[in-house]
Amino acid sequence: MRLVFVGTPQVAVPSLDALLASQHTVVAVVTRPDAPAGRGLRMMASPVAERARQAGLEVLQPQRPSDPGFLARLGELAPDCCPVTAYGALIPSAALGIPGRGWVNLHFSLLPAWRGAAPVQRAILHGDEITGATTFLLVPELDAGPVFGMVTEVVKPSDTAGDLLARLAVSGADLLVATLDGIEAGELEARPQPRDGISLAPKIGRADARVDWTRPAPAVDRQVRACTPAPGAWTVLDGAIIRLGPVALLGSEDAGQEVMKPGEVAQRRGRVVVGTGTVPVGLGHVQPAGKRMMTAAEWLRGVRSSQMVLV
């Protein structure tokens, strides 16, 4: 089939690579406009735009996918199908009708679970043991279209959102190609999503990433992992923000018997621990404001505070 691929972040690049290696023909790519990034806030092209240009593809970067100029160019390209992975904007009805076989979206959850912008993060936050990826036909309602196929993925106890998303990006790319193969061959029919089991996955914001030490230790662990690498878990000591890497759930021997208040920091058995709503957790890596990421032990040696409580 003749394809126009639609995607933006690094997690969408495996999908583009898989399509370029498939029997289908990618004639252009749609991605979000260049945006400021890095410490200098220099304008940067998206990872998908960079990969597309390396492959010699036309790159379309509309401010809004409803822009008349973009819709006209998409019509001129005459795609049979528009596969989508993590584009970052809603596709308007005017665009949905352009490709003859529609827009096929790769979503990183087992729909109808976790519809929305942060399905992987929400799955980790919720403590899901199994997640996956789904291909479905885009419709105006958010992530509600009929499903073509799924792959499952075990959520490992140590998975960060970045770890899990990296695996799903690869297995999901294979699923996307298989879905398009099946559509072209006339062997695949989309089936409506079940009415039961719908859950929503709104974007994880900076406020959501502030660690709540009053919660039980497993919930603190999931919160930090769900926010790693972005937006990055954080806490506050003496009014200064500190970024955190994943924490460690401790056995009874390492956690110790002494009761610790939520957020209280101590050193036990050679490791730095923090109190939670239940038992302490072990700090892994810490990044004080304006400094590099370092081990918790390095950080603690440099701290000058009479109130060693994280809030």
Image (spheres, grey):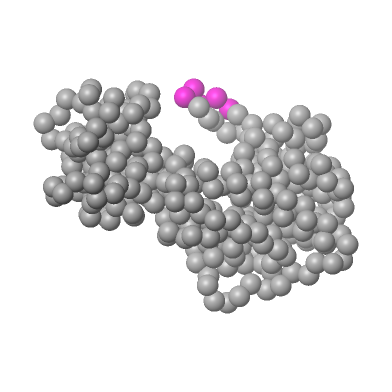
Q: Residue at x 52, y 43 (%)?
A: 162
Identity of the residue furthest to the front in this view: 253
Residue 259 location (% of width, % of height): 14, 50
> In the displayed structure, would residue 271 be above or below residue 261?
above
Residue 179 rendering spot, x and y as whole percentages: 77, 58
In front of the other: 252 or 279? 252
- Viewer-nearest residue: 201 or 224: 224
Q: Position of residue 241 (x, y in %)?
A: 29, 34
How many numbered marks, from 0 up?
0
Q: Quadrant of residue 125?
A: bottom left
Specify the segment rendered in magenta: 39-43
| Image spot of residue 32 (x, y percent) | 64, 41
Q: Relative to residue 219, is residue 136 drawn left or right?
A: right
On-image quarter of the C terminus: top left
Whether residue 166 is visible here, answered yes or no, is yes
Residue shown at the point (19%, 46%) measured from the top left: 256
Please indicate, yes or no, whether residue 207 appears anywhere in the rendered image.
Answer: no
Q: Residue at x 49, y 51 (%)?
A: 156
Residue furthest left as drawn:
306
Q: Is residue 247 magenta?
A: no
Query: 130 or 69, which lies in front?
Result: 130
Q: Main secondary structure of the magenta part?
A: loop
Residue at the image point whose x is 25% and y is 43% from the top = 254
* Residue 298 shown left or right of residue 20 in the figure: left
Asked whether 42 falls inside the magenta stretch, the response is yes
Q: Nearer the viewer, residue 51 or 127?
A: 127
